[in-house]
């Protein structure tokens, strides 16, 4: 990307090439006697460009308004209305139900408890997410609840259902029938996010004989990964279809679709939702293997959002490449205005410890700096000893990370890197954000029925809150997946001036805005003048 502003002046003054391409162009233009030496000089000059300024953040100061949303996985310990209410008060924005575990009766209880907790917190919008089992492989139950495998010991991995509920250190059941024909001698089998590694020795009948590469303690129904093996499981199983049907009947807002490998798999889920009259339910594609990365550009076009599911991803691809994959996936989502979640092992040590490791804190902060709209807690809230403390810690880290943002710089970057042409709706949203940087506006008000405009406003990361007025509760709940969005629901859309006045009054009661400040309003033109498929932007004064 070309340098601009003060950086451009600096480069021109000192005759420094702005990019590597510019260095090569200089070489071709000058045609020096010693091309190698000249090019080396030019490339060295590229490295002398002034670095971005270090953010001026007071260490002991913590901002008060959080923009990044927090997803909490629900387990038995926090499934009651009291604990769900406490999680909401502490910072939970999304309730995640993992359908790899649990019964419909149990999930009905979770949903009922969530509604009960929300009823006493009017104006608090918490989305309900269904995480599919997907084409994943899991172990069965272990004798006594857990087993300990010794390094170097022989372990038979079996598909024989006789051992489904009685796993031992020497024989572990998995629910993938084709396992003996999928893996080969010399191949690897990982269990529980790679905690236990097994090397395949021999395949016979329903059994795969292995040797333990390392020791580990394994509990019930742990995930299984087969690196570099081509798994034949369908993207949407009959169980997934039944689970999604159950979820739609019970008011889910989003599906986290596991192990998405192609855009066709996303479309299969959307077709199912359409048949259930639930097209409003968002589909987030979980990227968990190399095939998903290879096909990501097509997946991104089809999906409503993305989850960077680093647990399985870090086993399916080399662990050291997860760092690069995370940044690439998040950046592409940002450019496409698709919400993105960073997940797995973010505060893992808080399952047992009251405080996280320093590396975990940095991991959460860096995910937010990368551009994640949401961060997710898994075992920390599902089975951990310190669920409320984990959410509180994640809130604190979000606030600190957000304080580091160079809003103007992010806006300019997104503007420069976004492919052209852009839609009129995105152009209007971008203009609103640009205007918000020129003056000290209290907020950007978005009046939206479909929820599209708010995605484009959030894409450009305004410094002020995005206050969304909608007539659909599911749009308000889905708004939590967009950074910086605060929603308010009205019964119906009437006169646009009345809607904007209402938005200002609600914002004042929430402490978002004050009398005398200004706001930017973005809304569909048909609310005021009957012009369809257009978006209007204007400045209003808060009275």
Image (tube, grey):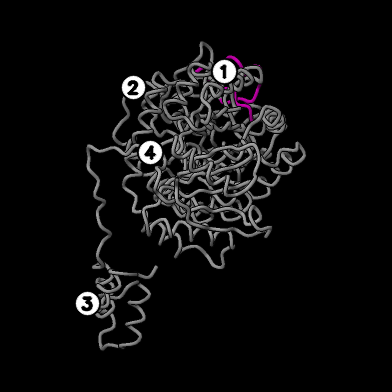
Label 1–label 4 contact, CB within 8 A = no
**Would you call the spot at circle 4 few (<14 residues within 10 Å), some (14-19), or many (20 or more)?**
some
- Residue 198 visible from this viewpoint: no
The mark lying in front, picked from 4 and 3, is 4
- Image coordinates of residue 122 in percent, x first then y, are 53, 27
Q: Which of marks 2 and 3 is nearer the N terminus?
A: 3
For label 3, the residue is 14
Q: How far apart are marks 2 and 3 (CA)?
A: 54 Å
Question: Which residue range is magenta in the image?
Answer: 157-176
Quadrant for residue 33, please give it.
bottom left
Label 4–label 2 contact, CB within 8 A = no
- Image coordinates of residue 464 in percent, x first then y, are 41, 48
Quarter occupied by the C terminus: top left
Label 4–label 3 contact, CB within 8 A = no
Q: Distance between the residues labelled 4 and 3?
A: 42 Å
The label shown at residue 65 is: 4
**Would you call the spot at circle 1 few (<14 residues within 10 Å), some (14-19), or many (20 or more)?**
many
For label 1, the residue is 141
């Amino acid at each position: 990307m070309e340098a601009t502003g003060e950086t451009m002046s600096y480069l021109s003054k000192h005759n420094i090439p702005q990019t590597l391409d510019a260095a090569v162009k200089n070489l071709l233009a000058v045609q020096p006697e010693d091309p190698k030496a000249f090019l080396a000089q030019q490339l060295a000059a590229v490295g002398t460009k002034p670095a971005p300024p270090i953010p001026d953040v007071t260490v002991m100061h913590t901002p008060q308004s959080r923009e990044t949303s927090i997803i909490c996985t629900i387990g038995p310990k926090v499934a009651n209305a009291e604990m769900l209410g406490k999680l909401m008060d502490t910072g939970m924005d999304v309730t995640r139900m993992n359908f790899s575990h649990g019964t419909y009766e149990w999930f009905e209880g979770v949903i009922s408890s969530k509604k009960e907790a929300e009823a006493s917190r009017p104006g608090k919008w918490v989305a309900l997410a269904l995480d599919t089992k997907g084409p994943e492989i899991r172990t069965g139950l272990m004798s006594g609840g857990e087993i300990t495998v010794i390094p170097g010991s022989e372990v038979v991995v079996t598909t024989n259902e006789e051992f489904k509920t009685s796993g031992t250190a020497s024989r572990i059941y998995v629910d993938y029938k084709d396992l003996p024909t999928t893996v080969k001698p010399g191949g690897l089998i990982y269990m529980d996010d790679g905690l236990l590694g097994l090397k395949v020795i021999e395949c016979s009948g329903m059994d795969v004989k292995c040797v333990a590469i390392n020791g580990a303690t394994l509990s019930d129904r742990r995930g299984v990964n087969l690196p570099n093996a081509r798994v034949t499981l369908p993207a949407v199983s009959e169980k997934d279809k039944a689970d999604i049907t159950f979820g739609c009947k019970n008011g889910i807002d989003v599906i986290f679709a596991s192990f998405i490998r192609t855009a066709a798999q996303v479309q299969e889920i959307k077709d199912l939702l359409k048949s259930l009259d639930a097209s409003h339910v968002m589909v987030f594609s979980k990227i968990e293997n190399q095939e998903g990365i290879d096909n990501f550009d097509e997946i991104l076009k089809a999906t409503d959002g993305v989850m960077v599911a680093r647990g399985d991803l870090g086993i399916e691809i080399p662990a050291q490449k997860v760092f690069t994959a995370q940044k690439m996936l998040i950046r592409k989502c940002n450019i496409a205005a698709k919400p993105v979640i960073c997940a797995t092992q973010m505060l893992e040590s808080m399952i047992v410890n009251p405080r996280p490791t320093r590396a975990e804190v940095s991991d959460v902060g860096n995910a937010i700096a990368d551009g994640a709209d949401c961060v997710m807690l898994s075992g920390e809230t599902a089975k951990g000893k310190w669920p409320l403390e984990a959410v509180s810690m994640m809130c604190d880290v979000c606030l600190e990370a957000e304080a580091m943002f160079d809003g103007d710089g992010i806006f300019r970057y997104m503007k420069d890197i976004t492919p052209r042409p852009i839609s009129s709706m995105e152009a209007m949203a971008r203009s609103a954000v640009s205007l918000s940087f020129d003056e000290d506006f209290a907020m950007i008000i978005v009046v939206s029925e479909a929820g599209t405009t708010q995605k484009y406003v959030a894409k450009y990361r305004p410094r002020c809150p995005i206050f969304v007025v909608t007539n659909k509760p599911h749009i308000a709940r889905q708004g939590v997946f967009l950074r910086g969005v605060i929603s308010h629901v009205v019964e119906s859309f009437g006169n646009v001036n009345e809607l904007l006045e209402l938005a200002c009054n609600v914002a004042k009661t929430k402490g978002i805005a004050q009398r005398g400040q200004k706001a930017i309003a973005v809304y569909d033109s048909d609310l005021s003048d009957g012009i369809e498929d257009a978006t209007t932007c204007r400045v209003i004064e808060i009275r």
